[in-house]
């Protein structure tokens, strides 16, 4: 993945996660989550205590974005 592709992925990922999943007020467990992308392999990194549903949905969003790029 080139740097430009990563930048596009990170921007779209951040927008969709914030809009659809609202990690500051999790619709699944009510907690606060921190979700970001690893610069090395572009995998989501989660804060301690992320609920399973947040993790699953975040990975789905990342896969959808990668397929579109």
Image (cartoon, grey):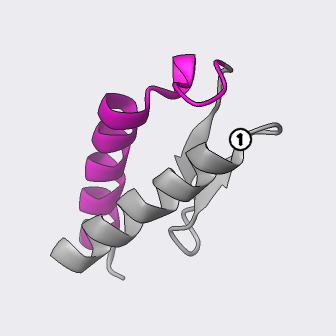
Q: Is residue 19 above or below residue 46?
A: above
Q: Looking at the image, is 2 positioned above or below residue 44?
A: below
Which one is nearer the viewer's eye here, 56 or 34? 56
Q: Which residues are magenta?
A: 5-30
Position of residue 58 measured from the top left corner of the image (x, y, whole percent): 49, 53
* Residue 45 shows up from this direction: yes
Residue at the extreme bottom of the image, as rendered: 1
Callout 1 environment at 10 Å: few (<14), some (14 to 19), or many (20+)? some
Q: Position of residue 56 (x, y in %)?
A: 56, 57
Q: What residue appears at the point 48 percent right and 53 percent down from the top-left corner?
A: 57
Q: Residue at x 69, y 49 (%)?
A: 52
Q: Which residue is mark 1?
A: 51
What residue appears at the point 64 percent right and 30 percent down from the top-left corner? 33
Secondary element type, mark 1: loop
Quarter of the image that includes the N terminus: bottom left
Please identify the dominant SS of the magenta region.
helix
Q: Residue 55, how many percent across, how many down?
A: 61, 52
Q: Is residue 69 visible?
A: no
- Residue 30 is left or right of residue 42, and the answer is right
Residue 44 lies in the magenta stretch: no
Residue 54, quarter of the rendered image: top right
Give the quadrant of the C terminus: bottom left
- Examine the structure image and report whether residue 15 is included in the region drawn in magenta: yes
Locate residue 9, reporting x and y percent.
Answer: 31, 61
Residue sitting farthest toward the left:
68
Nearer the observer, 42 or 25: 25
In-front residue for pair 69/30: 30
- What is the quadrant of residue 26 in the picture? top right
Q: Is residue 8 above or below residue 51?
A: below
Name the image quarter holding residue 61: bottom left
């Amino acid at each position: 993945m080139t740097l430009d592709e990563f930048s596009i992925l990170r921007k779209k990922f951040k927008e969709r996660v914030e809009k659809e999943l609202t990690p500051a007020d999790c619709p699944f467990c009510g907690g606060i989550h921190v979700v970001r992308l690893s610069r090395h392999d572009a995998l989501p990194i989660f804060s301690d205590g992320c609920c399973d549903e947040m993790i699953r949905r975040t990975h789905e969003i990342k896969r959808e974005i990668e397929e579109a790029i």
